[in-house]
Image (cartoon, rainbow, N blue to C red):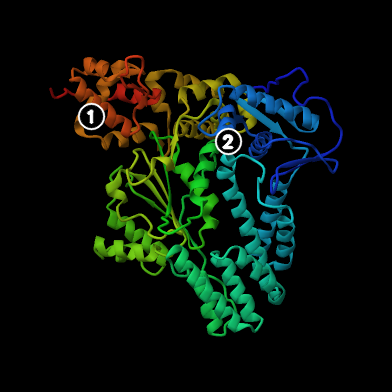
């Protein structure tokens, strides 16, 4: 593992300043030492501190700091300014919380300090568990303590660029904790004392249906039915005027139970149809934060549409694993649940939209199996799906889309829902601004992925061999997962022995196969989706080498006209089998192979190309 390096003559933390530190993120970003406020000036230095704390001891790169400080318009002196902010923080914090220079960024070690966000998360987690285990008294106490960690809106004094990325997620966590605490109080019969608080909350958040439903229940149990009817009518009017939707299931059910004179029964459990989280998921911190921000952003204004996000990247880049991780993180923001559908069969064949729609409808309704639902025609299935999602708050995850044609009819209809798509191409139906592109993992994250599977001790025992394995996998998450699985299955063998197998290009792809994980098969499925002409060109392109190279050079190697070669190269880029790079001095577009794709292309049989 790489060692931590420090900048500046004063060492990593500057002069030793006594006193325990406490950091606040759930309100104005601030620091106190032994109860006294530590002075910090300016939004940017507060932003740097907040980003380092939010990273929880992970590396924050210079590019990440630049993005949250200046977005897309950093000054020419950005690196110097970042260095200045970090130096000022080091001097201010002292040795109680140390900032290290590590590779292309910085790490804040605040393990010995109190951070209000981390305290909130711990208390909320314990309170949620107590509520799930039917211990409402303890749940209410823990969740109340969690909410006491807040002192205003999260991150009040940072740049707008950081606010856009992080505040929606933090404020959502606060709302969820509040709703759970109210649920605990209702189950303890504290409805009368809840009414004033809920009246205030509904006035502040008039379109929050969950809070309004709780208010109706509290009023009903307090024998204030006339007011409960008025609260429901006001909510229905606001939803119609502001969003053009009718009340959702939770609010409607609370109203109907009140009309029937029933107590608040258990709510229907939301659908959660998702792949399991990957046990070795590592890295992708910035990409995951970007996706959460896109999916948790609340729609506003007339004509609002469902939020949508696209994850794209080459075969094996971890699109599905990232989507599953983010969907699990965001699930509680969608009261009616999360549904997932694979858009490709195991052999790489695109699934018919009717089959996917039938599967989604069966999961959402919980009354019919997919085979029975599929008997309806495509148009009827699309109509049912749009009606079912028109006023729902769902997260729909569509995995491995092959293009716009396959997405037609699968987009949720209502503004309360969100869509997360993975694809090797970039469907025109989804905005480029909402696209997250996955590149290779850097060495640090790649080593961390291996360590998750084989253990830190084994990684530390053979650091050179581990770096060799990482280098031969070229940052491709699937290759690293296969390598990790093979090493974990043979704990008695050295890492160096496996690294030697990978060192030979002729046996590398064969070595990157374990159980159902097979890199050659994954690349083969991607090739099978190409047009026959482009699939035939790919093996001949291996003679060009890793690149970068131009369409003119590709044409010379394959014997194709430059225009024909360029068309094949562009299709390979769309399939995730080539990287495109900005043009060089001549203005010609340039292309580059991933090392493992190049090996796959070189091993494929060469057929005669049509002239």
Q: Secondary structure at mark 2?
A: helix
Please name which of the two marks, 1 or 2, marks the residue nearer to the observer.
2
Q: Which residue is mark 1?
A: 534
Under tag 1, what secondary structure? Answer: helix
Q: Residue furthest left?
A: 611
Does residue 225 appear left or right of residue 109 in this picture? left
State the image coordinates of residue 434 (x, y, percent, origin top left). Answer: 43, 43
Q: Is residue 206 above or below residue 318?
A: below
Q: Indicate the quadrant containing the C terminus: top left, top right, bottom left or bottom right.
A: top left
Res 464 → quadrant: top right
Q: Which mark is residue 68?
A: 2
Q: Quadrant of residue 536?
A: top left
The mark tally for this picture is 2
Q: Earlier in the sequence, mark 1 or mark 2?
A: 2
Residue drawn at (74%, 56%), measured in percent from left and top? 148
- 302 on left or right of 179: left
Q: Position of residue 68 (x, y in %)?
A: 58, 35
Q: Which mark is residue 465?
A: none
Q: Residue at x 80, y 37 (%)?
A: 38
Percent from the top left, x then y, of residue 502? 45, 22
Relative to 73, residue 183 above or below: below
**In the visual, does 597 lie left or right of 272?**
left
């Amino acid at each position: 593992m790489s060692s931590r390096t420090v900048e500046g003559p004063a060492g990593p933390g500057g002069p030793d300043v006594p006193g325990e530190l406490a950091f606040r993120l759930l309100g104005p970003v601030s620091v106190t030492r032994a109860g006294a406020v530590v002075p910090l000036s300016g939004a940017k230095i507060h932003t740097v501190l907040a980003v380092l704390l939010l990273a929880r001891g992970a590396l924050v790169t210079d590019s990440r700091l630049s993005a949250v400080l200046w977005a897309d318009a950093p000054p020419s002196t950005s690196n110097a300014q970042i260095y200045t902010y970090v130096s000022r923080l080091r001097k201010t914090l002292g040795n109680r919380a140390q900032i290290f220079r590590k590779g292309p960024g910085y790490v804040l070690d605040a393990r010995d300090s109190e951070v209000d966000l981390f305290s909130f998360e711990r208390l909320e987690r314990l309170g949620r568990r107590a509520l799930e285990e039917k211990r409402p008294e303890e749940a209410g106490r823990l969740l109340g303590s969690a909410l006491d960690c807040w002192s205003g809106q999260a991150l009040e004094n940072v740049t707008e660029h950081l606010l856009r990325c992080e505040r929606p997620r933090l404020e959502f966590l606060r709302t969820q904790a509040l709703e759970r605490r109210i649920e605990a109080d209702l189950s303890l019969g504290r409805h009368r004392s809840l009414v004033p608080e809920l009246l205030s909350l509904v006035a502040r958040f008039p379109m929050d249906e969950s809070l309004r439903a709780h208010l109706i229940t509290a009023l009903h149990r307090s024998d204030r039915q006339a007011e409960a009817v008025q609260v429901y009518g006001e909510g229905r009017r606001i939803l119609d005027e502001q969003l053009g939707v009718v009340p959702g299931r939770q609010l409607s059910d609370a109203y109907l139970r009140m009309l029937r004179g029933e107590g608040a029964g258990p709510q229907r459990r939301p659908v959660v149809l998702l792949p399991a989280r990957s046990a070795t998921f590592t890295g992708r911190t910035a990409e995951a934060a970007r996706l959460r921000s896109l999916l948790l952003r609340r729609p506003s204004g007339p004509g609002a549409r469902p939020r949508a996000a696209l994850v794209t990247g080459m075969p094996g880049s971890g699109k599905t694993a990232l989507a599953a991780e983010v969907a699990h993180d965001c699930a509680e923001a969608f009261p009616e649940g999360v549904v997932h559908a694979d858009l490709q069969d195991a052999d790489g064949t695109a699934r018919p939209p009717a089959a996917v729609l039938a599967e989604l409808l069966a999961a959402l309704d919980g009354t019919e199996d997919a085979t029975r639902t599929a008997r309806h025609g495509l148009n009827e299935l699309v109509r049912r799906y749009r009606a079912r999602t028109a006023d729902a708050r769902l997260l729909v995850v569509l995995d491995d889309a092959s293009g716009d044609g396959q997405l037609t009819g699968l987009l949720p209809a209502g503004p309360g829902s969100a869509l997360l798509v993975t694809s090797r191409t970039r469907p025109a139906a989804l905005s480029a601004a909402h696209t997250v592109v996955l590149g290779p993992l850097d060495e640090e994250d790649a080593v961390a992925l291996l360590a998750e599977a084989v253990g830190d001790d084994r990684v530390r025992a053979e650091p050179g061999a581990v770096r060799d394995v990482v280098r031969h996998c070229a940052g491709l998450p699937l290759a690293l997962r296969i390598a990790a699985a093979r090493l974990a299955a043979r704990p008695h063998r050295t890492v160096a022995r496996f690294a030697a197998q990978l060192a030979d290009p002729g046996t590398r792809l064969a070595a990157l196969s374990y159980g159902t994980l097979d890199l050659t098969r994954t690349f083969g499925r991607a090739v099978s989706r190409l047009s026959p002409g482009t699939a035939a060109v790919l093996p001949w392109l291996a003679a060009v080498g890793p690149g970068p190279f131009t369409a003119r050079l590709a044409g010379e190697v394959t014997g194709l006209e430059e225009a024909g070669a360029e068309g094949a190269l562009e299709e390979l880029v769309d399939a995730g089998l080539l990287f495109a790079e900005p043009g060089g001095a001549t203005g010609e577009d340039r292309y580059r192979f991933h090392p493992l794709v190049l090996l796959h292309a070189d091993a494929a049989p060469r057929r005669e190309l049509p002239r």
